[in-house]
Amino acid sequence: GSTIVLIEEFIGSGGSAIKNYRRLKKALDADGKQVRIVYFSLVAMVSGSNALAAEGVEHYVRRLLDRGISDFYEGAERDRAVSLMERLESELCPVSDDGRLKKLHFGYARSETLYVHQGGNACNNVFPLFWWRWLRGPKARATIMDRLQ
């Protein structure tokens, strides 16, 4: 009974974790090895944890996070907050050395993540308003989070 433990600081949409799980499982199956694969994560978005569960991936998370706007506000207040974030994001340059903003609207897979590890790299699940380095123009801007490619 062997077990492989995969450790992640953060799981956003769950897409990368599922892709890595499938790749590892396929390689182990090809070698005829029966191995238990378990994910441990310090922090995960609820949607990412649900995606792992739907895939049948055994995983444990220390802290689950809801979406920053959609799971926090309700009704007209949520609509107002979404509209405000859309307006703020519209001030960002749609294309930069970081890629295309369109794919990251409200964070990758619309994760609406409000998480960064102090001194760490902001993930692309975080609202780009906090880390996207370019305003329309393009004009460089200071950000409150760093995102390295």
Image (spheres, rainbow, N blue to C red):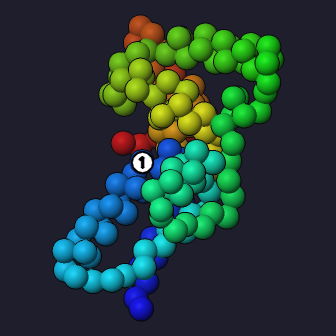
Q: Is residue 51 visible?
A: yes
Picture residue at 48% right of the left edge, 34% below the top: 109
The residue pinned by badge 1 equals 15
Instruction: Relative to 104, say whether 139 is above or below.
Output: above
Q: Is residue 19 left or right of residue 126?
A: left
Task: Name the residue nearer the viewer: 40 or 121.
Answer: 40
Picture residue at 23% right of the left edge, 71% below the top: 27
Instruction: Relative to 82, say whether 106 is above or below.
Output: below
Task: Name the residue nearer the viewer: 118 or 39.
Answer: 39
Q: Position of residue 129 (x, y in %)?
A: 57, 25
Picture residue at 56% right of the left edge, 36% below the top: 111
Disc 1 residue type?
Gly
Please tell me whether mark 1 sits on a helix, a strand or a loop: helix
Q: Residue 126's image quarter?
A: top right
Q: Quadrant of the C terminus?
A: top left
Q: How many marks?
A: 1
Q: Quadrant of the N terminus?
A: bottom left
Q: Residues within 10 Å of mark 1 (few under 14, many from 20)?
A: some
